[in-house]
Amino acid sequence: MRRPDEVVDGAAEALAAGLARGHTRRSFLGRVGVTLLAVMGGSAVAAAVRPDEAESFHFCGHIWTTGSCPNPYSLPRIDRRGFPLRPRDGRPIDNLGRLVDAEGYPADETGARLAGPDGELLERGPRTRLCEDWVPEQFRIDAVTQGSWYRCCSGQVRKLVDCCSTSTKRVNGDKALRGYCYTGRRVFCVMYYDTGLPC
Amino acid sequence: MIETITPAVCGNRRRRRIAVALFGLAAILAAALVGAALGALGAALGARQAVIAVAVLAGLAAASELGFLRLPLPQLRLQVPDWWRFQLPLPVWAAGYGAGLGVGVLTYQPFATFWIACVAAVTVASPGAAAACFALYGAGRTLMVAWPARGGRDAPLAVEGLVSRRPALARANGLVLAATALALGLAAVPAAAAQPIYLGGGNQLDPSVSSGTLAYTQRDGTVAGVVLRPSGSHDVTYTGRTPSLDGNVLAYAAADGIHVVRWRSREELQRAPNASMPALDWPWLAYRIDTWDGARELWLTNLASGDLRLLTRVGAGLDLGRASVAAGRVAWTVSGVQGSRIGLYTIETEKRRIFVRSKISVLANPALSDSRILWVEQKRGFSYLRLRPLESSRTTTLASSGDRDLVFWTTALSGRDAYVTVWLVSSGVAQLERYRF
């Protein structure tokens, strides 16, 4: 027999799937939020929380409350090895949020290497895994990527990934849930990987 | 005003609602205009650093509201003209009253909070933000007209009820002002005040300071030169970059390597071919050598005795940043895709240690003084100027930038002054700023 929280989770998953099939939840909520803010507070406030930059614990496929893992922007998009990608287009970025070329050097939109104020080309900056590297340093806890699940987002399969820890608190500051973590770990924060597979 | 905007005065309940709406609209607009004007004034005055002044005034106002101090409040001892509502149409007098009270300065002002908000709006130095904040004042005045008499409640009774609560309101207001003063004071204490250094056109970077003389790289297009600005004397220039100054000795990098000169007489003392990124603390000179196999080495030499030491070597793929030498120590940074670290070497004991490391941030451009170390940390889209005593683990953030377009670059430390190159990425402009801590 399923536990009550599993029943609730199941219903939530079904709702999530329905939402995901229909539209991009993040952008939908983002646009509603921006419209509301624009009405209430004017464009200055609205400009500060554009959907692409908005700090949000909801993104397409994830309607639960656990927050995003720390990342260079505010949406925890990763590649299949857990390194950061630019949320907007999935291009690789370093920990500072700069686009990087194939060798990891900071580059502009065209792929040309960036130069510093001294005219010298910029050197490589850190590009490390959001769960295994960012979380331990920022929160002084252990963290490892464990469970994942899949949703359909913007016409492609999105893999949602739990960053799990033995910490009983999650990134939100409250009690962590078990989620898809195992070996006694709980969900500290969440990330996502867009597979590119159509759905 | 509660007793003025009533169904009896307005004619009926519908006209009262219209009057409240017009009053509110005018009050909010007027208050926002005042806020915008104050914000624009602050922007014109460059008053962004006056946070501490707001904190002090808020503290005084709190003492006044709580009865510890008697302070006269600037105010016009006037009320809105009573005759308007008899001689003018309802939309005009309702909006007029709203505007008059929304402006805030034309009538009695029994609480000091309004004036603190005015000073704070100047400090915000942004017309839009100040207008948005002040609009709340207009909304508050509207609320005080609409809320007590809601649902047909008796207006005079509502006024009496409010008056009876005045002491409690004053205490609450005083406590809020005290909390504001405390919060602003705490916010202002760790932050050092930025003092832009105006050095003319072009880009200025790589500061180095010694005995009151500032040296820096002046970059105009692709041409770079070293400029020295002694106090009370003419500028001295050299063809090169990345100066490091110690008294009357200057080390700088040129196309053929590092030159060490007495900068006033231009007498050359030493030359280090194929070396770059000099850091001088006479007689010690640290510099970087890029080897044929892509490795980078940090060397330290005693220019008087000839003592030569290899401090560190990093392989291809890692960046070895410019070092800093002071008081018998050398600091440097190493960064790569796996993270970055600041290394520290003690010349006397020949011991090395990692001072600070990170897997997620870029730690760069350290500057040493006798007792402190300054460096830049870049994390996510943020840039921080960090300062720490060498014998302590307590780090202070002198400045921060939450703008990806504004990045801190090279640094220098002299006494209680921190110098940093501020780089505007999109325009490529680089300028020097000083922070006194």
Image (cartoon, helix red, strand yellow):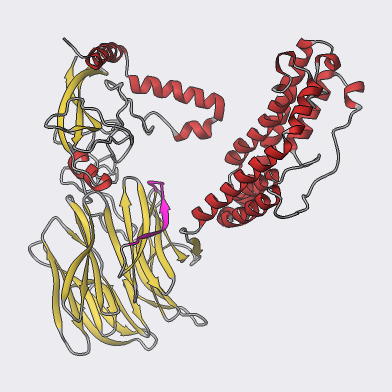
Residue B85 in magenta stretch? no
Residue B398 in magenta stretch? yes
* Residue B239 visible in the snapshot: no
* Residue A89 visible in the snapshot: yes
Q: Position of residue B356 (x, y in %)?
A: 24, 60
> What quarter of the picture does the N terminus of chain B occupy?
top right
In the depicted view, which residue is nearer to us: B222 or B380?
B380
Q: For residue B26, which quarter of the picture?
A: top right
Residue A40 placement, left or right of A4:
right
Residue at the spot x=25%, y=55% of the render?
A121
Residue B354 placement, left or right of B21:
left
Residue at the spot x=30%, y=65% of the render?
B366
Q: How many marks?
A: 0
In the depicted view, which residue is nearer to us: B268 or B206?
B206
In the picture as drawn, the residue positioned furthest to the left comes out as: B293
Q: Is residue B100 above or below residue B154?
A: below
| Highlighted magenta segment, given as a residue range | B394-405
Residue at the spot x=17%, y=41% of the render?
A132
Q: For residue B103, which quarter of the picture?
A: top right
Q: Position of residue B67 (x, y in %)?
A: 71, 50
Residue B382 placement, left or right of B101:
left
Residue B328 placement, left or right of B349:
right
Q: Is residue B307 above or below residue B361?
A: below
Q: Position of residue B315 (x, y in %)?
A: 10, 60
Q: For residue B320, which quarter of the picture?
A: bottom left
Q: Is residue B405 above or below residue B162?
A: below
In the depicted view, which residue is nearer to us: A147 or B276?
A147
Residue at the spot x=60%, y=43% of the render?
B176
